[in-house]
Image (cartoon, rainbow, N blue to C red):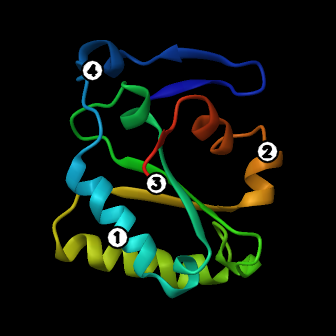
């Protein structure tokens, strides 16, 4: 866990970070395949799907054994605005279906974020910056 001032970019490590070993756990192929298939099976995403990026600690090479997989989905600007992360379709449908399906096939934790292409192209904030700098493009 990191504490600090995000605006200044200062952080300090907690005592638990110093005693918990970091494992070089990269992405799990089963999780990558599951997430890609899931995205392409969602009617709100599938017809607008452009790309899937793995971001976060699994892509960065700093994952712990129990780290989740963080993904960023890029959809065309023709996708409904409510598909993006935090909006109605994402919250009520996509996120709910992801958790239900993930638990059925016993896949580890997944964070799935959705951005429209123009938002992705114009953004210099996380998660777009993560995808652009160190993200692994799955498709």
Name the residue tied to disc 3: 139
Place of residue 16 in the rendered image (x, y in percent of width and height, measured from the top left): 32, 21
Percent across and percent down for residue 80 are: 73, 82
Which label's residue is closer to the chain start, 4 or 3? 4
Q: From the viewer's perspective, is the residue at label 3 or at label 1 nearer?
A: 3
Mark 4 → mark 1, Cα distance in angstroms: 30 Å
Q: Which of marks 4 and 1 is in front?
A: 1
Marks 3 and 1 sit apart, C-alpha to C-alpha, by 11 Å
Crowding at dot 2, Cα within 10 Å, few <14 / some 14-19 / many 20+, comes out as: some
Report the residue marked by disc 2: 123
Secondary structure at badge 4 equals: loop
Marks 3 and 2: CB-CB under 8 Å?
Answer: no
Pointer 1: what residue?
37
Quarter of the figure with residue 90: bottom right
Q: Mark 4 points at which residue?
A: 22
> Is residue 126 depicted above or below 102 in this figure?
above
Q: Is residue 125 above or below residue 11?
A: below
CA distance for labels 4 and 3: 28 Å
Q: Nearer the viewer, residue 128 or 15?
A: 128
């Amino acid at each position: 866990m990191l504490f600090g001032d995000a605006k200044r970019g200062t952080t300090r490590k907690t005592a638990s970070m110093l005693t918990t070993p970091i494992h070089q756990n990269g992405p799990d192929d089963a999780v990558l395949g599951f997430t890609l298939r899931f995205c392409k099976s969602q009617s709100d995403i599938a017809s607008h799907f452009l790309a899937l990026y793995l971001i976060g600690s699994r892509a960065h090479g700093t994952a712990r054994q129990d780290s989740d997989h963080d993904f960023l989905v890029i959809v065309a600007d023709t996708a409904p605005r409510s598909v993006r992360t935090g909006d109605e379709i994402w919250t009520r449908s996509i996120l709910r279906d992801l958790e239900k399906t993930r638990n059925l096939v016993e896949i580890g934790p997944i964070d799935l974020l959705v951005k429209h292409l123009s938002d992705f192209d114009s953004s210099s904030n996380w998660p777009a910056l993560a995808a652009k700098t160190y993200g692994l493009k799955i498709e």
